[in-house]
Amino acid sequence: MKMKQFIHAVSCALTVCGFLLLGASCSKENEPIQTVEGVTVTIAAQSDLQTRTSLPVYDGDYGNNIRGVQHVTDVYLYIYEMDEAGTDGECKARFNVGWREYFGANNLPDKTAVMRYTFAYTFTVGKTYRLVAVGVDGATGQDNMPDYDGMNSKETYGLPESIQTGSKLIDPITLQEGKTPTDMAHSEFFTGYVDFKPASESDKNIGEINLWRRVAGLQVCLNLIPKEVERVRILLYNSQNTQVKLLPSAPQESETDKIITDFITSPYGNDSFNEEGRVLMDKTFTEDDLYLPGSSTGVVSDYAYKCSLTAFMLPVNISDRELYDYTLVAEFVTTSMTGIVGSSKKVRLIKPWQNSDGLDFEDETDIGTGIIDDLDKYLFPIEANHFYCLGTPSHPIGCSGVLE
């Protein structure tokens, strides 16, 4: 299996088109303050989105983008009044643009769709505002999303209520109390913004808002898994984060590399080594997962397991090369003849975009025993709006030698 590159996924776009109402109000000493009192927003959800509660299994060509369908159910628009430094702002208003009401709860589009939304807000001329849009999956049943699985990003991250009037722009989006890594694995949301500083009452140059996924997607497709394997788990090097910035932050450039800043260290369970927080995927095999490889002779002993696993996760910094020799690891757990869980074999996963088989079947390296020449293959950040694809259903990663 040859892995190409990580895959970006583009979200939806909100185009702010113009003003409907113009007006003025007066301040103290009768000095007029020019205001703009209404805007119209054109919202376009593109068909190359992948906005589902459950991450769809990707089986297309590798490349820079994934052609998918969009299942945004709700879009919210927040108005932030920025400080003089332009580094933070305070939420002054929130609007539900009425996406599902516009299209109908049972007729939500899965292709490119456009709606116009007008809202009333008094913008002061000369003051800087940041218009932030958030797109969420708020499905509550299969009637409005056929692949609904009982979880959605509104409940997992408390959107839109987690952003209140008075909230700061730098306040993070946080996993809600009682929610677990399983909920995170099934939840995604999108954000985007445009800065607006009206120069006059007739200023209509608002610009466009592009929404981008604030979570990362991971897909792992494996086959030829020996029947001795009871389950497979995909683990992160540390407990996954439970917070993410509302808006992405650009990387810092150094002389040799870029330094990722778009993450918040916030381990699940407040413990970097929390085992539950490390688990991104956990698959226990059943008879339904057995198949007969094409090259087999057809006898029972030739049967093997296969699986396609998908999950979302929040951005994570690159692991420390002094402490870890992997970012992602696959753990194959075997069962003894008596049914008691036996040993497990951990296999480091390489960067999904490198040309390789994707699995390294050598023994797990002991940290601190020496220099690992190819360590860069295994250490990489988990970045928002990136789709990390390790195998596809038509080109899975073969695991026949995983227990050798």
Image: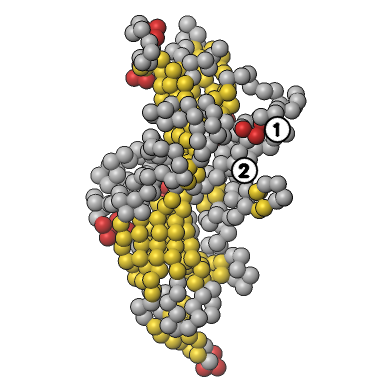
Per the image, the residue denoted by label 1 is 323
Residue projecting furthest to the bottom: 30
Q: How is the image coloured?
A: secondary structure
- Residue in the image at 47% along x and 12% along y: 228
Q: Earlier in the sequence, mark 1 or mark 2?
A: 2
Residue 97 in the image: above or below residue 351:
below
| Residue kind at label 1, given as amino acid type | Leu
Per the image, the residue denoted by label 2 is 317
The reply to whether residue 34 is in sight is yes
| Residue kind at label 2, given as amino acid type | Asn
Residue 371 image position (x, y, % from top left): 74, 28
- Residue in the image at 70% along x and 51% along y: 254
Residue 133 image position (x, y, % from top left): 44, 60
Real-space Cα separation, disc 1 to disc 2, in angstroms: 14 Å
SS category of the residue bearing label 1: loop
**Quadrant of res 302:** top left
The answer to whether residue 152 is left or right of residue 89 is left
Residue 223 in the image: above or below residue 53:
above
Crowding at dot 1, Cα within 10 Å, few <14 / some 14-19 / many 20+, comes out as few
- Residue in the image at 52% along x and 15% along y: 401
Viewer-proximal residue among 167 and 380: 380
